[in-house]
Image (cartoon, rainbow, N blue to C red):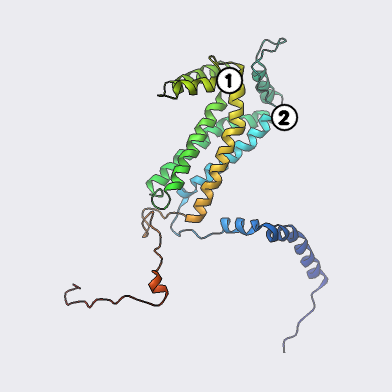
Amino acid sequence: MAITRKPTKAQLRRQKMEELVMYPLDWLEERSGLVGGVRYFLFRNVPADINWMQTLGSAALTAFLVQAITGVILAMYYDPSAATDPATGKPVAWESIVNITDHLFMGWLVRGMHKWGASVFIILMFLHMGRVFLFGAYKYPRELNWIIGVLILVMGMMEGFTGYLLPWDQTAYWASVVGINLNGTAPFLGPWLAQFLRGGQEIGGETLTRFYSLHMLVIPGAIIALITLHLYLVIRLGVTSPPWSKDAAGREPVDEPSSARSGLTRPVPHAEPGGRQ
């Protein structure tokens, strides 16, 4: 007969602390199932022969999160105005950038992370896209996820283009002139697209306001929506094995036919000597 001991006071205190800590998570899980979904996303099964090259997507996602966080911080102090400050004779937008870099606590670090992080984000997306192509991860049934990834890449490049004008200095101004004129050479929609980006016939204050709204609101919202759908499809379809795996890229396990599941099997033809049937 087993003898059960009463828990000690220390064990009771530990149990109560665990219940107190887990209560918010249990409350959230009971009402939304969100905790279970996050646990499944973090601890789902993946092929045993994957390597570090398949972390490029996560690295690109991390770079985007860094861009989002630093961008929100910069937006709190940036003034998207092309007007000239009468006291200094310099554009207000440029002065706000100088204030962030030179006077705001750790502002130089936040702006540097955002500036160079944009290039890192785009480079990682290209590397991730190349890995997906070389590994054949764009094949059936992942074609839709490939298309979404291409759209994320396009949106990321548009985010970099619209953000380049925001310092409102000579380099940003003339680089934006070149970029807008290149878009204007596109057939049919080119002239309309160039006028839409400029906000008129010439680049000015309206252009800066339009680029700021696209950079801060429209494009990030589209990227977040596409990344969410992208991750959902990754979870639903799983991770593709590398080319050297025994399982071919793009191939999914074939379900058993309904007749086999119901206990009905097709007769196997008799094999003749020599291996022919």
Can you give x and y, in whole percent of width and height, for residue 66 in the image? 60, 38
Between the C-alphas of marks 2 and 1, the distance is 30 Å
| Residue at the image position 42 percent from the left and 45 percent from the top | 131
Between marks 2 and 1 in the image, the one whose residue lies nearer the viewer: 1
Q: Is residue 95 visible?
A: yes
Can you give x and y, in whole percent of width and height, for residue 118 in the image? 55, 33
Question: Few, some or many C-alpha atoms within 10 Å of disc 2 (few <14, some 14-19, many ≥20)?
Answer: few
**Residue under pointer 2:** 105
The quadrant of the picture occupied by the N terminus is bottom right
Three-letter amino acid code at disc 2?
Phe
Which disc is residue 207 wearing?
A: 1
Can you give x and y, in whole percent of width and height, for residue 29 in the image? 68, 59
| Residue at the image position 70 percent from the left and 30 percent from the top | 76
Q: How many marks?
A: 2
Q: Which residue is most to the left?
A: 274
As displayed, is residue 275 above or below residue 34? Answer: below
